[in-house]
Amino acid sequence: MPVFGRLETEVAAKAPAYKFHEVNGKRIHETAKICPKYFQKIDLKEGEWGGEGSVTCWYFVIDGKDVMFREILEKVDNENQPVTYNVIGGVLKETYQSFKFIVQAIPKDEGSLVRWTLIYEKLNVDVPDPNAMLQFGIDVTAKIDAYLIQEELEEKTIA
């Protein structure tokens, strides 16, 4: 019997929503540079960086372990700013029948709110909820936010 689940969290950020959306979409290849503590590398296997239908392999560290997963960039909504990734291989497929990440940057008066949604189907009832992946999203958001704020300061200095 399938066991479906959904986890969500929202993280307040100082950087504008459009900047987060860019990093989660067309600038995704920069993530390893932005967050080297978390991502070792990201390889493009099919398509174009940030293009719907593109396939990437992510090599990263979670809970102190080196892991990999392969995913398809399923949807990029430039109007409402969610980006949807569908995991098709690697560590998450060992315990989940299906697994999607949705990252949405929501504009606020100052900064943005970054919403992480994990939608999954466990292989069996004994599989734990992916709380470590949700925490990973929170931690990565903080690193990306710091990077984007620094990038914005440097742009203002140059201008």
Image (cartoon, rainbow, N blue to C red):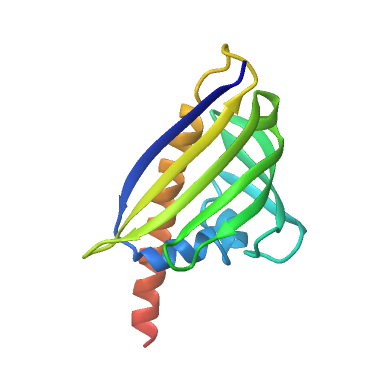
Say which residue appears at 39% left-offset and 85% top-offset: 158
Report the quarter where the C terminus lies. bottom left
156 to the left or right of 129: left
Judged left or right of residue 75, residue 147 is left
13 or 7: nearer the viewer: 7
- Determine which quarter of the picture holds residue 116: top left
Image coords of residue 106 (percent x, y): 34, 58
The x and y percentages for residue 8 are 40, 37
| Residue found at x 36% / y 39% | 9
Which residue is rendered at x = 41% and y = 70% of the image? 151
Name which quarter of the figure residue 10 lies in: top left
- Expressed as whole percent of the image width and height from the top left, the position of residue 61 reads 59, 37
Tell which residue pokes out farthest to the front in this image. Answer: 1
In this rendering, would 44 be left or right of 153?
right
**Which residue is at 53% across, 26% downward?**
4
Q: Position of residue 109 (x, y in %)?
A: 21, 65
